[in-house]
Image: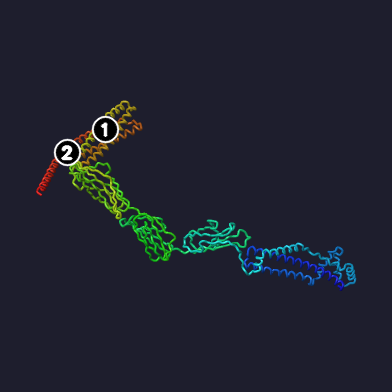
Amino acid sequence: MNKQATTYFRHILQQYRAQRTKDRLKHAALFCFILNGIYLLLGITAESLWYLPPDIKQVFWLAFLLNILFIIHFFHILWDVFARHSEKDNADLLLRIGRQDINVEDRLLNHYQLASQEDPLSAYAVEMFIQRHSAQNFDMAFHPRKATVKRNTVVILVILLTTALLSLFPGVKRLVHPGKAYEPCFTYSISFVPGDTTIYAYDSLDVFIRRKAPEHIPLRFYLLDEDGKHPQMLTRVSDSLYHFRLERVRESVHGFAALRRPHIFYPRLYFATDTLHIRVLERPQIRTLDFTVIPPEYTALPETRFQGDVDRIRCLRGSRIEIRALLSEPAGPSYAVIAGDTLYMEQKGQSNYLHVAPVQSGMISFMFFNRDTIGIREPLTYVLELQEDAYPNLSVIRPERGDEIILNDNLTLPLMAHIRDDFGFSAFQVRYEIHSDYASGDVSNTHTVDIPFSPGSRIQTVVNTWQIDRFISPGSSVEYYFELLDNDMVSGPKAVRSSHYYARFPTLGDLFARQFEEQKNTSDILEKELLSRQEMVRDIEQIRRELLMKGEMDWESKTALEESIDALERSREQLEQMQSAMEQQKQFMQENMLFSDQVMQTFEQLQQLMNELIDDEMFELMENIRDKLEKNDMSGMEEVLRDFEEKAKRFEQVLERMLEVFKRVQQEQRLEELARRIKEELRQQEALLEQEENMNSGDLAIRQD
């Protein structure tokens, strides 16, 4: 390429690159100023609002070092002017420049390429192009970008920065001193009442927070632990006082209260804060609390143990209670309050001891301290229930109330009683008084007879007899009752008494009168039974004859036969009752020895006849007849009735013989009664004479004195 062409094309390229570099530098400078201005304006605003801490301000200023990137960018732009470009870069740029002119278009690039040819024709074509299109024609080929927006932005930023410097000068002043911390000047305050304090474990604490701040600034309270902070609800007491209660604190507590900004346009998240540190001292812990109840010795009960997790302690009156409390640390002066009395406990190591014998029910409270006189959270309170030794229970089975008891010669009375007590008995006895028409004066003495029982059994049935150990004359009466005493050795034996019972020692006349009255009733029953059987035999004989004549039994005959069967059934029941009554008569006569052995043998014959009557075959036939009537089976009925008639006649004969024997027994008894009465009268006369002699001897001795 010749010198003229080289100068021509170099001028075009340099001129274009110079204009482009100038435009780039202008835009880069404006952008750098805008970016730094905005950043500075934000920093001034942030410092004015939030009082940035020193470390943030230092970071803020360090960020300006990023402008080095702009400086590097400036050098890179300038390098485009002075650097040597490749043929390709020049060709591309000439193509862009040529296309700016519609008369040139691609010919500028084409002639640039021809200039590199050595032939004359190419040189001539280039020369002609240079003459036609001078280099100055391409000086305005570069069209710079518009910078109006950026220039306006710069102007606005300058105005804003100037305004900020004037209005926010304190913030600017603080900002240019990044190493110094500044605090906003607020008059708000907050404080805990009480402040940092120390309490004992499981105590409760009322925390009050005083605040001095406008109403729209909220108050927050947080408790801190290893998991973070936890907001708490506060109770407002007044405009400036808030309350929070810590219940049963078991470990140290840390918290803080703060006046929190209502929105972000305040310099601090919290305007004012105060911290609360509560140190918790451990109270002595009760590891074990044992109550050992030792019942009274007479109860023979085992010891009872209660743990401290119960709410009441029950024991029998007279029991002793041993109390042992084991603390978590050496024990100090501890005490118990029982029924208003304060009892101090003994200490040994970590244990407290107390032995007490309570006398009444009530509340029992314990207060335990360690050697530093630090006590438990609150007294331990229990209900103490003293249970009384219950009264014994006496239930007399025999004699029954209302029984007429007749004494025999050996003066013994029956007894059957159930006795029960919770811990045993000390005595079981009968107390009696003798009332006699012959007793002188109005004095009646009470006598006592001990009744044996099993001392080791708390529930038992006593079956025994007891004997009157005092003289009693015929016709006298005995009033008695039973008394049972338990073995209460604390409050004294408690006694229960039975109802009063009455017995009579009859005269000989009373005994015979009773016996003859019963025998008269028996005799009347036998006579009525004999007449009834005779009438029944006649009725059955008539029914049998009608059956034999007619060959069947009409309704009236059946009804009459059924009535006879029912009457016979009632007779058997009456005979069984008579048998029982005769057995009682026999026992009564034997107990009172009213008659001789000969009379008693005759009476036994009478009983044998009664047994024959009850076991008679007539009653078996009665059942057979009843079955036939129920089944309406008349086959063989005539034969059955004939057999029944024969057995009824034999039954009648046995009944007549029994009545004769009974009358003979009555006659023998009357004779023996007369003899016994004469002997009794003679004995009483002798007793009266002896009594009169004794009285006369007594009067004579009195006169001699």
Query: Can residue 615 be seen at all in this image of the molecule?
Result: no
Q: Report, in whole angstroms, how far the alpha carbon at label 1 lies from the one at label 2.
A: 37 Å
In the foreground, 438 or 636:
438
- Looking at the image, which residue sits at the far top? 549
Amino acid at dot 2: Glu
In the displayed structure, does residue 110 sit left or right of residue 515? right
Seen at 35% across and 33% down, the residue is 630
Cβ–Cβ below 8 Å for labels 1 and 2? no
- Badge 2 element: helix
Seen at 27% across and 38% down, the residue is 577
Of circles 1 and 2, the one toward us is 2
- Looking at the image, which residue sits at the far bottom? 3
In the foreground, 434 or 185:
185
Within 10 Å of the Cα at label 1, are there few (<14), some (14-19), or many (20+) other Cα atoms? many
* Vertical order, 458 against 597 (above or below): below
Residue 9 in percent (x, y) is at 84, 70
Residue indicated by mark 2? 673
Query: Can residue 69 be seen at all in this image of the molecule?
Result: yes
In the displayed structure, does residue 638 sit left or right of residue 371? left
In the foreground, 614 or 376:
376
Residue 235 in percent (x, y) is at 53, 56
Seen at 52% across and 59% down, the residue is 208
Within 10 Å of the Cα at label 2, are there few (<14), some (14-19), or many (20+) other Cα atoms? some
Residue 369 in percent (x, y) is at 41, 63
Amino acid at dot 1: Ala
* Vertical order, 546 against 511 (above or below): above
Residue indicated by mark 1? 648
- Looking at the image, which residue sits at the far left? 704
- Badge 1 element: helix
